[in-house]
Amino acid sequence: MFSFNVVTGCTIKTLLCADPRSVIECVKAAYIDHHYGKTINPDSYFLRFPDNPDNRIIALPAAINAEEKVSGLKWISSFPANIQSGIPRASAVLILNDHETGYPFACLEASLISAARTAASAVLGAYWLNGQSKRVGSIAFIGAGVIARNIADMFIADDWSPNEILFYDQDPAYGVALQQHVGEKLSGKKTIANELEQVLHADILVFATSAGTPYVPASTELAPGQIVLNISLRDVAPELIFQAWNLFDDVEHCLKANTSPHLAEQRCGDRHFVHGTLAELMLGHITPDKSKPSIYSPFGMGMLDLALGKQLHDQAVAKGLALAIPQFFGETKRW
């Protein structure tokens, strides 16, 4: 009853690499559970630092009350200057709590979990917006960091077949690094772009940057049927949101914190540009308007980390890879 396990990043990486497609299925199931009200997903809580406003640590509490019942908290930091030292921007832990007693029973390294569920959400959205097809003319990655790498890996694991892949980053070296990482694992011609405008024509645009305010101008012409994976949420001008068919993972969560859709709401004062959620699309309740570009804006909810974290914890325990911490709790009796 009072067991406590630690699952290290090395173990998480091993499990994720062994079966990356299961992450997509886990995320899909979590979105469906969320749609049917089987999750609790409060707002995220931000710890900010007045002396360094670029840095933040975010708490994402959540609970799942489906077949798997579990609660927990992801505690994830974002310190952008880390990349200047060659270390990842984000680091995280995930705490899992027992549904019956509330006692925590595990701590998992969660930056890999967070990146994997983000990538799975992106590829799942692309698949359903692309008519449930994995063939596409071109995919462009705008931003070539850890999240872009994970999304590229998920496209690879899910057997996508683009004819061309384009890479753009403000630091050209990062674009080259992502191109080299992808190599021949993803089919298609590989192109490094020197300017943002060179990639905006791609059939699928993957925005995976750390931008705080929109830089893709309102004058940008997105094509009918073009798919925009708005993963970093703050890249495109709100005017582009108005022109698109807009899909979300959760509308209320995404229309906060000055995301591009939130700026659009502030600009017009209503939500006429909201067309539905990914769960509604997967359940057949809505259909994309192919006369418009589609923009998918997934806020990235804590319940996704919780669902994937619980799955990975159980796998680690079953395989003898979890580290048990005896007597973690100092008192297990009231008297």
Image (spheres, rainbow, N blue to C red):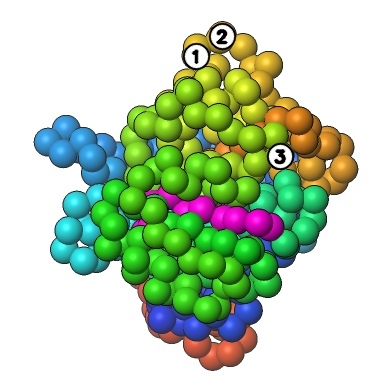
Where residue 166 sits: x, y (%)?
48, 57
Give the alpha-carbon distance from disc 3 to disc 2, as whole Å: 27 Å
Determine crowd level at label 1: few under 14, some 14-19, many 20+ residues with C-alpha closer than 10 A.
some
Label 3 vs 1, first from the N-terminus: 3
Q: Where on the picture, by quarter, is residue 49?
A: top left
Q: Is residue 161 left or right of residue 285?
A: left
Name the foreground residue: 172 vs 50. 172
Amino acid type of the residue that numbered disc 2 sits on in the rendered structure = Gly
Amino acid type of the residue that numbered disc 1 sits on in the rendered structure = Gln
The circle on residue 80 is none
Indicate yes or no whether the magenta region holds residue 195.
no
The circle on residue 266 is 1
Name the foreground residue: 20 vs 326. 20
Amino acid type of the residue that numbered disc 3 sits on in the rendered structure = Gly
Q: Residue at x 37, y 32 (%)?
A: 215
* Callout 1 touching callout 2 (CB < 8 Å): yes
* Callout 3 touching callout 2 (CB < 8 Å): no
The circle on residue 225 is 3
* Callout 3 touching callout 1 (CB < 8 Å): no
Mark 3 or 1: in front is 3
* Total numbered labels placed on residues in the image: 3
Secondary structure of residue under mark 2: loop
The circle on residue 269 is 2
Is residue 172 among the parts visible in the rendering? yes
Where residue 305 sits: x, y (%)?
54, 57
Q: Is residue 162 left or right of residue 213?
A: right
Residue furthest to the left: 51
Is residue 58 among the parts visible in the rendering? no
Q: Residue at x 71, y 39 (%)?
A: 225
Quadrant into which the N terminus falls:
bottom right
Write down the region rendered in magenta.
136-146
Q: Main secondary structure of the magenta part?
A: strand
